[in-house]
Each structure stands twice: as C-alpha cells, then as structure tokens.
Amino acid sequence: MKHRADVLFRTIALGTLLLALAALGALVYDIVSGGLGRLNWQFLTSMASRRPEDAGIYHALAGSIWVIVLTGALALPLGVAAAVYLEEYGTRSRAARLIEINIANLAAVPSIIYGLLGLGVFVRFMGMGRSVLAGACTLALLALPVVILSTREALRTVPGSIREGSYALGATKWQTIWYQVLPMALPGILTGLILSLSRAIGETAPLITIGALTYIPFAPDGLWSPFTVLPIQIFNWVSRPQAAFKENAAAGILVLMLLLLVMNAIAVFLRDRFQRQGRP
Amino acid sequence: MHTRRLEWIIERALFLCAALSVLTTAGIIVVLAVETFEFLREVPVVEFLTGTEWTPLFATPRFGVLPLVAGTMLVSAIAMVVALPMGLLSAVYLSEYAPDGLRRIVKPVLEILAGVPTVVYGYFALMFVTPLLQRVFPQMAGFNALSPGIVMGIMILPLVSSLSEDAMRAVPQGLREGAYALGATRMQTALQVVVPAAFSGITAAFILAVSRAVGETMIVAIAAGQQPRLTANPFVPLETMTAYIVQVSLGDTPQGTLEYRTIFAVGMLLFLMTFVLNMVSTWLRERFREEYS
C-alpha cells in the first residue's frame, strides 16, 4: 500500500514535468503553424506597411541588430571592469560588499522599471531623445547585472597558480589581469555576454517605455536615428484585429526565435571550447 | 613609480565601473521619486492608494490605483497557482527521482521556457490559450486574466523548479539516509524530510517568482485587455500596473502633464512592491545557506 502511493506520486510528478514540456511543444507548434507560410524573402526585405501582405520585418530586424550590437559594446567593457574590480581588487572592502548586494537586487528589478529610468535619464535628462543610443544605454543597464555575475564566475575558474606565476615573474597586478587572467576567462565572459544579450534582444517593455516607435518605415542610419525592434513590431502586429497581421506576428516571432537560436548556439560553442581547454 | 601610479588609476577606474550599479539604483529611485512627488502634489496620496476608480485619461480623471493593483494581484495569483505546484513537483522529481541522464536532457529544455521572449508568450496566450479556454468557458471574453495568468505561470515555472531543486539538492544526504533507515518510502522522504528541510530555500524561490509575475509586462499588455477594473473575475478584461505603463507610453500623452506623471507613480509602487519581495527572498536564501554550512 505504501509502495503504491509512492508509485502514484512518482507518476504525478513525472506527469507534471511532461506537462510543462508539452506546453513548450504547443508554443512552438502554434508559432510555426501560424507563421511559416508567411516567412519568405519578401517578408525579410520589406519595410513596415499598412497592408499586411506587403509588410516586412527588415526595418525591425535592422533596428534590433543596431541596438543589440551597441548594447554589447557598452555592457562588455563596463561589466567586465566591474567584475574584475569585485573579484580581483575589492573582495575585502565594505564598499564591494554593498555593490554586490546592490547588483543582486538590480538583477530582479522588473525590466519596465529600467524603461522608466531610461526615459528619465537618457531620453530627457541627457537629451538623447527616442534614439537607438538611448535604447542601447537602457538595455545595457538592464544587461549589466548578468554580465557582471557571469564574468565573475569566469574569473573564478582561472586557477590562482596562474596569478602567482605571473607575480613571481615580476608582473604588476594589472599586467597579471590583462595578460594572464582575462585571456583565460575570455570564452566564459563572452558566453555570459551573449546569453545576457539574447535576453535583451527579446525585451519589449523598456523600449516601449522610452518611446521606441511602433510604426516606422525605415531602418536606423545612425546612433541618433529613431528606431523600432523585432519584439515591438511583433507586439504592434499582435495588437491589430486583422488575422493577416497576426500571421505577420507569428512570422516575426519565427525570425526572432531563429536569431535567439543562433546566439545561443554561439554561446554553447564557446562554452564547449572553454571546457575542453580547461581540462588538464 | 610610474607603474604604481598607473596601477592606482586603473584600480580607481575599475571601482567607478563597479559603482555604476549603485548609481543605477540611485537613478531609478531619483527618477521615480521626483515624478511621483510632483504627481502627489496634485493627487492626495490617500486618494491614490485607496481610490477604486482609475480613469486618468478621461475628461473627469480619477486616480485610484486599486483597480490596477487588483489586476496585478489577480493575474499573479493565477500564475502562482500554476507555477508553484508544477514547479515544486518538477523539482521533487528532478531532485529525488530522475536518473542523471534524464535530468541532463530535461533541465536545458526547461531553461528554454525561461528564455522565450515575453512578447512571444503574449502571442501564445492570445492566439492559442484563450481560444482553447473559451471552449471550456464559453462566457470568457477575448481579453481576460485567466489566459495570461496561466501562460505567465508556465513562463516562471523553470525559475521555481530550478531554484527549488537547488535547495533540495543542498539538503545533506544523511537526512535522506536517516529517513530510509527508519523505513520511509521515497515519497515520504521527499515530502516529509527533504521538502521541509529545504523549506526556506523553496520559499525564497516562490517569493522571487511572485516578484517576477508582478513585474511581467508584455503577456498582460497583449492578452489581458486594457480596462482597469476592480474585480476578482478571471473571465473579464482588466489591466495591470505594468500594462498601464505600456498603454500610456504607446499613446501621445505630452510630457510634464499629470497623466504622464501617473506612469512614474505607478512605476514607483511597482518598484517598491518588487523590492520588498526581492529583499525577503534574499534574506530567506541567506538563512537557508546558513542552516547547511
């Protein structure tokens, strides 16, 4: 009797797990069946249009790539510098402890709050307007906590003997970090960066809040250009009542998911190489 | 001498980058506080926090935030009803039952659920889950709280599951062996020894999940409708705090007006709610770590 309850419980637990996986299956099926018919070269190379059959994703794809490359360019140096300080320099100080707690808290702040921050600081106070640059600055702040946390993980995997060897040869602390520690930790750092960027590329709410446009018939041509991104274009299409726009939304989601898949594949590839290197 | 100076400058520069995170927090608080203060000069704080009507864009505006708070709570509660039992059961299975090979396959697949952009979940809720639910509940409106709530639950399930599993795996093996030695089955061990032993870690995961649900935006902006309504009925359209911020941001409300400031006041309330939840979660996790170190 006791045993039967055990088997029953185990079955229910496994069933729950399978149910969660089935939800993922339903999600993928729903999007592929809804959007695959619309996905073609014309869709990838056309701009926004009021007629659903003419509309495309080019301007939004270009906007997403602009924003995400800039976000990475801002988040990588700032995040790595912060992580190096916390991991290599300030481990004992009270300021470092305070910063650590603060970063953990920031990682859990809702993304839409970052949008309000970006609106207040970048768009209005610093006068960037509703530009690509303001969007990238906002997303960089959003991505920073994750970049810092993953960089610290990567720095921790570098053995202490490397540092001691470098010091023994007369290198200074910064020379040791720059020439020995960072190169060894680089694949891990890049993996973390790409994963945090693949989160940022799916973000919609903060960019809507800073005022990224929902209808824009051209691709960005510079840092100060107005822009839209894939998730906002998808949101715009989903919000329209016509069924043809919903199909566009599904096709747009497919493009977004493919982009995510590519980014994650690169991250996995880097991590794999990293692990092989680390083996004795 | 020259190198030492350079070293000193580099250390300061690195410190400044690290301190940027403190500046970010300060920036959030200042931006929200300044606009909220301006807002509260025109709308009494009591009216804002206890009013039951939210119509800031109407000719005769009302600024009672309760309908938005109630909408947020209802959707989050539905999400937790889905995510808590499912996440916990998945975690128990993965931690106590699953063979290593299966766990290695299932965990990354669950992680995919956490990595799907929220706008995609919004589409899924509106185009798949709502029509499905309407077959069961014909009286349900096209926009409602139930469908986005369930989808949000699926979205935060991996968070609940992986943090709970971490907590359960941190429970010393000796406790399990002791239970088996006393003749307990695997289920009794899991439910009466491991789960209680990991209780504060699991609670920390739950609270973090609530915080995530409260701050989630796009699913509700797409699938819950945009009608502030003080109700516990999951079948009718309503609006959450986050969806309201999106709604106003999409419109062309001029900067510096009272309507415009509402999004900062609502944002402030949202920030405070999630901040308290995050602090409690961190505190519980620290306590859990101390128990087993």
Image (cartoon, coloured by chain):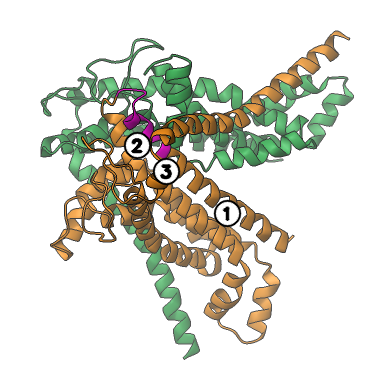
Chain colours: A green, B orange
Rendered residue at 35%/23% (across/down): B255
Relative image position of residue B50 (x, y in whole percent): 38, 51
Give the number of the disc on residue B245: 2
Q: Name the residue rendered at 25%, 35% in the picture.
A: B57
Q: Are marks 3 and 2 on the same chain?
A: yes
Q: Is residue B124 left or right of residue B200?
A: left
Q: Which residues are magenta?
A: B254-265
Q: Is residue B45 magenta?
A: no
Front-lying residue, A117 or B21: A117
Please indicate whether residue B162 sits to the left or right of residue A38 in the image.
right
- Within the image, what quadrant is residue B48 found in? top left
x, y (%) of residue B132?
A: 19, 58
Q: Would you say residue B260 sits in the magenta stretch?
A: yes
B65 vs A40: above or below? below
* Quarter of the N terminus of chain B within the rendering: top right
**Residue type of the residue flagged with mark 2:** Ile
> What separation in Å lies between label 1 and label 3 (alpha carbons)?
22 Å
Farthest residue, direction bottom = A1
Callout 1: helix, strand or loop?
helix
Residue at figure coordinates x 74%, y 60% from the top left: B293
Most prominent secondary structure in the magenta stretch?
helix
Task: Give the spatial CA distance, label 3 vs label 2.
Answer: 23 Å
The residue that mark 1 highlights is B281
- The answer to whether residue B5 is above or below residue B203 is above
* Residue position marked by numbered label 3 in the rendering: B115
- Secondary structure of the residue carrying tag 2 is helix
Q: Which mark sits nearer the N-terminus, 2 or 1? A: 2
Q: Chain of mark 1?
A: B
Q: How many neighbours does mark 1 have within 10 angstroms: few (below 14), some (14-19), or many (20 or more)?
A: many
Task: Provide residue A142's location: percent of width, then percent of height.
Answer: 50, 32
Determine the CA span between mark 2 and mark 1: 26 Å
Q: Is residue B105 visible?
A: no
